[in-house]
Each structure stands twice: as C-alpha cells, then as structure tokens.
Amino acid sequence: MIKEDYIGPEMSGILERRSPEWIMNMILNPIQMLEEDSIAIELLERYNFEYMYNQNLLEEEAREILEYFRIID
C-alpha cells in the first residue's frame, strides 16, 4: 500500500518526511535505529509492529530501495 498507512506509514512522500541518510540507516541498521532513534521508536509504538529485522542487505541494494522510493512519488 504505497499511498496509505497499513502496517506502517505510507511509502509515498517518504523522502519529504525523512532524509535519504535516515532511510538508508533504517534499511541497513534497523535494530540500532529502533533502539536509539526517537523517530523510529515513535513509529514502532504508533504502528505496533514487530522489529524490522536486519535483512543483511549490501549498501548498493539499500540504495536501490532508496531509488525506488524516489520514483514512486
């Protein structure tokens, strides 16, 4: 669900709400972000979802996801 909240915030417009660095950190270091970042902690509480487990993606793969976010807007 790109343009609506479902099990998390909508993906559409994510680059208007979060910096590319924040998104990359969330993709590459989700456990650390969910323990230390106030925005990530708030989202975890708001959507009552389980921790996003580390997918062990390469930085290049995370950049491809970030680029996907750029084109869905």
Image: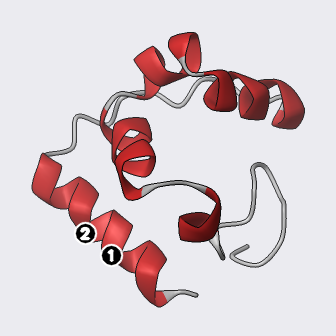
Q: Which residue matches tag 2?
A: 64
Q: Which residue matches tag 1?
A: 67
Q: Is residue 30 left or right of residue 8?
A: left
Rendered view: 56 above or below 24: above
Q: Residues within 10 Å of mark 2 (few under 14, many from 20)?
A: few
Q: Quadrant of residue 45?
A: top right
* Residue 40 position in % (x across, y down): 63, 30
Distance of label 2 from label 1 (alpha carbons): 5 Å
Residue occupying the point 39% across, 77% down: 68
Specify the label residue 23 is tagged with.
none
Please, what is the three-letter code of the amino acid marked with disc 2?
Glu
* Residue 1 position in % (x across, y down): 73, 73
Does dot 1 land on a helix, a strand or a loop? Answer: helix
Q: Is residue 57 left or right of residue 39?
A: left
* Residue 72 position in % (x across, y down): 53, 86
Number of numbered discs: 2
Residue reaching furthest to the top: 35
Q: Nearer the viewer, residue 7 or 43?
A: 43
Rendered view: 55 above or below 5: above
Rendered view: 69 above or below 17: below
Residue occupying the point 15% across, 48% down: 59
Contact between marks 2 and 1 (CB within 8 A): the answer is yes
Q: Nearer the viewer, residue 9 or 14?
A: 14
Please, what is the three-letter code of the amino acid marked with disc 1?
Glu
* Residue 20 position in % (x across, y down): 39, 57
Does dot 2 land on a helix, a strand or a loop? Answer: helix
How is the protein colored in the picture? secondary structure
Rendered view: 72 above or below 2: below
Q: Residues within 10 Å of mark 1 (few under 14, many from 20)?
A: few
Q: Give the quadrant of the C terminus.
A: bottom right
Q: Is residue 2 left or right of residue 4?
A: left
Q: Quadrant of residue 39?
A: top right
